[in-house]
Image: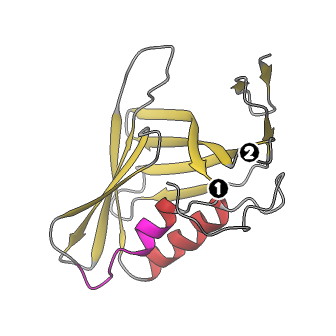
Amino acid sequence: MITRCPHGWLLPEVEMACLDDMEVVLRCEDTPSVSVRFAERHAAVEPNDRRMFFAVGAQAPGLDVRLEGVTNFVVGRGLVRFIDGLDSRGWRGEQRWVNADRDLKVSARYESSGHVALTWTLRPWRSAYGGWEVAVATWLEAGAAKDDLVTQLGDFMTAEGFPVDYHESDNEFS
């Protein structure tokens, strides 16, 4: 049975609960009109189904896209750990992270000015509308701004009490 949640999502056969309206918005420090937005958290109701679903939006001049149903295993904190692990002293080359469903990818490059360039790629793999892919680049200070993003995303990816205790394990799934 397909139902519609308060956010307007058509929920598939997996029974999900809408959690709240918490959101995290990352604005590019260099170009504030470029941003990435995490919002509309949902969790599978079945206690053994340890997934969280959310929407990710990307905005830039002439671009406004959103991808619903991005999946995160709620005991996995892969994206948070990836960003937290970016060394504020710098590194060479590019580091990459991708979620389990491969619909959200992030690549990181250290800039000599003490900033991190994050390229966010959204690519729905289960879209009824065919395939598309979009990437936006954000830029943030490698110290305090990065740490603030880690804190915000950590809070977003943790859905304590909705509908099960997601702090139960610290296993890495995504």
List x then y, in percent, for residue 126: 49, 23
Amino acid carrying label 1: it is Val
Is 122 rendered above or below residue 33? Answer: above
Is 50 rendered above or below residue 149? Answer: above
For mark 1, does the 10 Å Cα neighbourhood hold few (<14), some (14 to 19), or many (20 or more) residues? many
* Picture residue at 39% right of the left edge, 75% below the top: 85
Q: Which residue is mark 1?
A: 74
For the stretch drawn in magenta, what is the main secondary structure? loop
Q: Is residue 86 left or right of residue 109?
A: right
Kind of element beneath mark 2: strand
Q: Nearer the viewer, residue 75 or 23?
A: 75
* Picture residue at 24% right of the left edge, 80% below the top: 90
Residue 93, labelled with which disc? none
Q: Which residues are magenta?
A: 81-90
Q: What is the spatial separation of the Cα atoms under label 2 and label 1, in whole angstroms?
A: 9 Å
Which colour style is shown? secondary structure
Kind of element beneath mark 1: loop
Write down the quadrant of residue 141 in the picture: bottom left
Q: Are the residues flagged by discs 2 and 1 in contact, CB closer than 8 Å?
A: yes
List x then y, in percent, for residue 106: 36, 53
Q: Earlier in the sequence, mark 2 or mark 1?
A: 2
List x then y, in percent, for residue 91: 20, 76
Amino acid carrying label 2: it is Ala
Q: Is residue 152 magenta?
A: no
Q: Residue at the far front: name it.
A: 48
Is 63 rendered above or below residue 37? Answer: above
* Picture residue at 41% right of the left edge, 40% below the top: 102
Q: Which residue is mark 2?
A: 43
